Amino acid sequence: MKRIGDGAATRIGLIALAVILTTLFLVIPLAGIFYQAFAEGMAPFWQNLTSTFTREAIGLTLLIALLTVPVNLIFGIFLAWLVTRFAFPGRRILQTLIDIPFAVSPVVAGLLYLLLYGRTGWLGSLLSEQDVQLMFSWPGMVLVTVFVTCPFVARELIPLMQAQGSAEEEAGVTLGAGGWTLFRRITLPNIRWALVYGVILTNARAIGEFGAVSVVSGSIRGETINLPLQVELLYQDYNTVGAFTSAALLAALAIVTLMIKAVLEWHTHRREKTA
Amino acid sequence: MSVRSTLLRRVIATAALSMALGSTQAFSADRELLNASYDIARELFAELNPQFIEQWQKEHGESVEIKQTHAGSSTQARAILQGLRADVVTFNQVTDVDVLAQKGELIPADWQSRLPNYSSPYYSTMAFLVRKGNPKNIHDWADLAGDDVALVFPNPKTSGNGRYTYLAAWAASNHDNGDDEAATRDYMKKMLGNVEVFDTGGRGATTTFAERGIGDVLITFESEANNIRNQYGTDDYEVVVPPVDIMAEFPVTWVDRNVERNGTEDLVRGYLEYLYSPEAQRTLAQYYYRVNDDEISDEFAERFPQTTLLRIEDAFGSWGNVMQTHFASGGELDQLQRR
């Protein structure tokens, strides 16, 4: 029987199409970012990269990622553990709820937080009496980033932990292991790679998040501007080189992230083969 | 709580920064001031702020850091209502400052009387940016209703810039025909019919006109028109200022509620009063804003053609009235656009 794609012409055609589309939609724009960043030579690139505002933007971007990742790491493990190891009413609803940050547009998430925690918001008015400000400052940006990225770790863990089942842990319990030992000696080693993968995704998203943070940032230069916001700001300032310098920085971070991911995938694959 | 969170913030931010760059946070000023401003004023304040900081340091022996935030001034007003702790606002729309008084009670209703010239240290008017040689011979508002003229300006529904253009055309027409409302409506209908593209904001209209090459006339603030001309080529465009025009104020004020909290009463006063000083007025004039300082005005006279400027309050009563009768749903603008 002849299947679709068996003919040499079809096969070459399809491959060519894939290559052309990839080049058109991925490679050229990516190369374009770096081209634009260096369009006026090395000096303007370096000048933009080392400017105070860019450095502060880098600092804030890293700060947000640094706080978001551990929070969502713990939250994700806890949630996945809960959902896959215990039976309780509302378990399925909880599993659906995890996906809300995926389903909701980040801008909407940002607006919601603004309405909740803004000066006149439900919680915000209480906080503002205590002279605590969350919106238009970096804690607010961390808050919305945590919200937007919270499903990543849990989403990676849940299918794996469901597939693995709880047999090993039950065995551990019969041998007298306590909760912490159980987690450290059995659960954690089993989910290790999925966990790392989830962290990478969380990190990538936390670094690149634009929509939600733009709503709550108040765009104070040198204070609440992270790298993605900096890109937009410089572009509107007619500073194309500056905008693309920051963009190149983000792209470089993304590429590094993808490389780590690829290495891990290759590693996991090899482990599964030998196991 | 506030002290603790600031401390925590410092520690974490410094840690993150030094991790990122191996550097520590450089200098920290005695006091800080946050200026919430409109979109296209970045370069302007980047130039004005260091001048003020230097002067303040000299006169008071205190170092000051001025932080800037820029966005559409309606966006800024909303953010301040929601808790953005701006000490001063420097907007391009009087209505957006009014919002702070009406909706948030953050400033007194009579804020315009706190500083000279209705709290507007500089102003501008609407100008026509035409292509080299002015091929369609555009000199006055009446010329915009000609048969073969294509116009570009932002939508008055969404943009303050567009609103001023609409109101300037209306007021100039009324001025010319002796308040004949029917004739003015006829003129407005033709003029609005000549609009080729209604972009949502000023920057979009600029792109449409200068980069996509659409339309014969771009109508925008005089200051913007001159900056666009410098940006896109002084050989390709000309700026025309009509003989009768509207006064576009750039209102400034301090946000009392935030100022009290931040303890910056004297500082904000000094900052905003500085904008009226000859030094600052010269910088403003260099950015093609009109100023009230006579000496500076004379110095830059050739940049600012003579024109009769009408104030919104005189021509239309009040901003509230304008918004209600002209720009509300089903108002004059909607009816004029119905063909």
Image (spheres, rainbow, N blue to C red):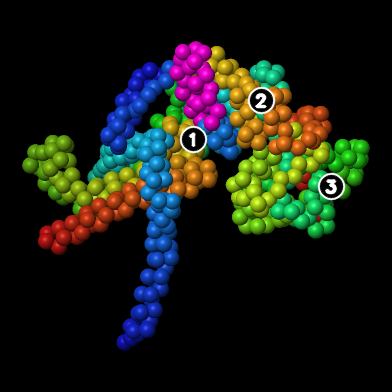
On what subunit does the disc labeled 2 rest? B
Q: Nearer the viewer, mark 2 or mark 1?
A: 2
Residue B35 is left or right of residue A161, and the answer is right
Look at the image and give the residue range highlighted in magenta.
Answer: B47-68
**Does A225 sit above or below residue B115?**
below
Q: Main secondary structure of the magenta part?
A: helix
- In this orientation, does residue A146 appear? no
Q: Which residue is mark 3?
A: B142
What's the residue type where badge 1 is placed? Ser
Residue beneath the point at 39% across and 58% down: A31
Query: In the image, which disc is placed on residue B121?
Result: 2
Q: Which mark is residue B330?
A: none
Place of residue A171 in the rendered image (x, y in percent of width and height, measured from the top left): 11, 46
- The three-letter amino acid code for the residue at tag 3 is Ala
Residue B24 in view (yes/no) = yes
Nearer the observer, B67 or B241: B241
Classify residue A169 by image quadrant.
top left
Find numbered disc 1 in the image and state the secondary structure of the residue it sits on.
loop
Verify whether residue A30 appears in magenta. Answer: no
Front disc: 1 or 3 = 3
Q: Which residue is mark 1?
A: A219
Residue B73 location (% of width, % of height) = 61, 34
Residue drawn 75% across the image and 53% down it: B134
Q: CA distance from mark 1 to mark 3?
A: 41 Å
**From this viewpoint, which residue is outermost toward the bottom?**
A1
Q: Is residue A64 left or right of residue A211?
A: left
Location of the N terminus of chain B (image quadrant): top left
Residue count near mark 2 (Cα–Cα under 10 Å), binned few <14, some 14–19, many ≥20: many
